[in-house]
Amino acid sequence: MTDAGTADRSGRPIRVGLDVGGTKIDAVAVDAAGEIIGRLRRPTGWGDDAVVESIVTAVATLADETGLTVSRTGSVGIGIPGLVDAEAGRVDHAVNLGVESLDLADRAERALGVPFRVENDVKAAALGAAALSGVSGSMAYLNLGTGVAAGIVIDGRIWRGARGTAGEVGHLSVDPNGRLCGCGQRGCIETFCGGGALAKAWGRPGALPIRDIFDAADAGDPLALALRDDLHHGAAAAVRVLVLSADVETVIIGEA
Ligand SMILES: [Zn+2]
């Protein structure tokens, strides 16, 4: 793979970023000054071939729509769920994408002739949060999405730990009598403040269950009040774990 900086110096000014989720890909193109010059959203394919194809199509379409050729793209950065080997550009166990093991960077590079970098979505969001917030030194980005995980950034670089699991706080149990988690344990942090677990516990239809829970809590609904308390309890537990174990200076909470 080519380093993004090297690619920039070779005279290809455009950089593309992709957020690959379980249902959709959000793609954005920025120019050399960091200004957004195009964006699009497309559905994500299911399985190795379809995931690669939907990523390649997203980059090619974005290039078309912004009036640029793919050859002017210096690099493409992908944030994707799953266990990511950023050095190799490989994704493993991306369950929501139907991907078991995929050499994503190699295959996308072969298709488009553009260097690709691949990173776990929460770790990519952590790097983005660190850059946008201007936090130097140490920080953690706690992601309250369908699942719960954090990325730890030290001096502008992701701290992965020995096996890439640093910051995976979602499956730390904080209540042995709590709700059953998908991982088999009870009372994981994720069962308190993960969007998936809260939506399941809420059990009522709606496109935005967390917003529904907050609205219903404001109106005094007892279940919603309890779940809102759970969310606060879980998020606080996650922040406590991050501060006590990694002693980061700052924790930023977001939803990527
Ligand atoms: Zn769990």
Image (spheres, helix red, strand yellow):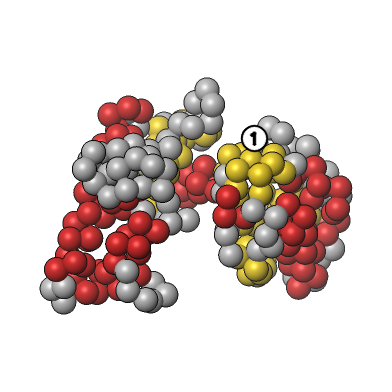
The spot of residue 73 in percent (x, y) is 78, 55
Residue sitting at x 46%, y 48%? 129
Residue 93, quarter of picture: top right
Q: Secondary structure at mark 1?
A: strand
In the image, the residue with mark 1 has its CB under 8 Å from the nearest atom of ligand 1:
no
The spot of residue 231 in percent (x, y) is 26, 55
Label count reads 1
Residue sitting nearer the eye, 91 or 8: 91
Residue sitting at x 13%, y 73%? 220
Residue sitting at x 80%, y 70%? 64
Residue sitting nearer the eye, 48 or 242: 48
Residue sitting nearer the eye, 161 or 200: 200
Q: Is residue 217 above or below residue 229?
A: below
**Residue 11 vs residue 32: left or right?**
right
Most extreme residue toward the top is 162
Tag 1 residue: 85
Query: Is residue 180 visible to us here?
Result: yes
Type of amino acid under label 1: Asp
Looking at the figure, which quarter contains the N terminus?
Answer: top right
The spot of residue 135 in percent (x, y) is 41, 41
Q: Residues within 10 Å of mark 1 (few under 14, many from 20)?
A: some
**Residue 90 vs residue 236: left or right?**
right
Residue sitting at x 32%, y 27%? 245
Query: Is residue 250 visible to us here?
Result: no
Q: Is residue 230 above or below residue 103?
A: below
The spot of residue 11 in percent (x, y) is 82, 48
Q: Is residue 229 above or below residue 240?
A: below
